[in-house]
Image (tube, helix red, strand yellow):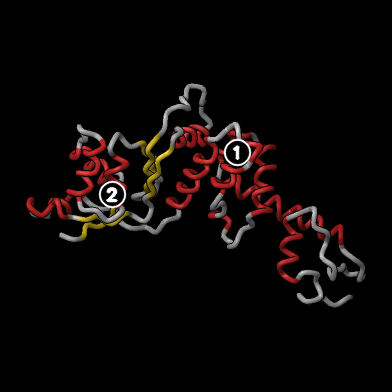
Amino acid sequence: MSPMPDREQISGGQSGFSNALLDPEVPTPSGLVGPDGLASDKRFSVYRNNVMASLIDAMGANFPAIKRLVGDDFFASLTREFIVQFPPKQPILFMYGDGFGAFLEEFPPVADFPYLADVARVEYAWLQSYHAADVSPLEASELGKIAAEDVGHAKFVPHPSMWIFRSIWPAATLMDRNREGADCSDIDLSTGEDILITRPVLDVQTLILPQGGYEFISALAGGETLEAAAGIAMGEVADFDLSAQISGMLVCGAFCQIIGQ
C-alpha cells in the first residue's frame, strides 16, 4: 500500500487541489495516486464530478425559482460556471450563493433576461431570512406604552430576518410564482416592486410594499425616528398612509424593539 502524499507533495497544495476539484480543465494534481501507486486520474475525475453535482444540487435547492425560469439543463451549466468562479467558502451549503445575483447580471448568456439577477437577490434574501436568528417581533402594545408626545422620537430595531429591496422588475412576484410552479404569463415585466421580506415566527413572508413604504421602512431601518421616517415617506408620496404603514410593519414583524423612547 503506497503512503498518502502530504500537502506539499500534491501539486499546488490545498489551493491547487481545490482548483482542480472544481474545474475540469485543470489536470489532476500530481502526487495523487491510487492503492497501486499509480496516478489516479479516473478516481479523481469521479470524485470531482460528484463534488460538482452536489454543489449544483445545493444551488438548485437555494435558488428554485431561477432553476425553473431557465430550465434544469441551463441552470446546471450556469451554476457550474458560478461555482468555478466563486467556490463555497464555508461547508454550510444551505447558505451558498451569495453574489449569484451579481454574477447573473454580468453573465453574457442571460443578457436577454436582465430580471434574473434581482430574482436571485430576492431568493438569497429569502434564504437569509429563513435562517436568521429567532427573535420575537415587536408587539403593537409596546408602541402603545409610549406617551403620545414621545412617539415621534421613537426609533426601531430591525428584526434579524428583515430585508428590504427595490427592484425595477417584479422580482418578488417572479420568485413566488416560480417557487410555487404557477403560471407566469400574466406578469408585467415593466412593473417594478418594493419588496419586504420577514420571518416573524416560522414562515418567511414576501411582501410588496405600497407607495412610500420603501422610503418609510428604509428610513426606520437606517436609524431615523418615526417622525423623520414619516416625513421622508410623505416627501415622496403626498397621501402616504402612516397609520396603515405602522400597522403593516407590526403585523409582518419587520422590527423587534423600540429604542430612544
**Label 1 or label 2, whichever comes before in sequence order:** 1
- For label 1, count other residues whose C-alpha is less than 10 Å away and answer few (under 14), some (14-19) or many (20+): many
The amino acid on which the numbered mark 1 sits, given as a three-letter code, is: Lys
Q: Are marks 1 and 2 in contact (CB under 8 Å)?
A: no
Q: Position of residue 115 (x, y in %)?
A: 52, 35
Instruction: Tell me the SS state at disc 1.
Output: helix
Classify the position of the N terminus by image quarter: bottom right
Q: Residues within 10 Å of mark 2 (few under 14, many from 20)?
A: many
Q: Which mark is residue 67?
A: 1
Residue displayed at 42% across by 56% down: 132
Looking at the rendered structure, which numbered label has been put on residue 59?
Answer: none
Position in image of residue 260 (x %, y %): 18, 61
Mark 2 residue type = Ala
Determine whether, in the image, residue 187 is placed left or right of residue 248. right
Locate the C terminus by quadrant: bottom left
Camera-near label (1 vs 2) is 2
- Asked which quadrant contains residue 31, the reply is bottom right
Is 155 on the left-hand or right-hand side of 87? Answer: left
Instruction: State the image coordinates of residue 170 (x, y, percent, origin top left).
Output: 45, 32
Q: Is residue 14 above or below residue 165?
A: below
Residue 157 placed where, x, y %? Answer: 28, 57
**Which secondary structure, mark 2?**
helix
For the point 76% across and 52% down, which residue is it? Answer: 49
Between residue 252 and residue 81, name the one nearer to us. 81
Quickly name the residue at label 2: 219
Is 30 left or right of 57, judged from the image as shown? right
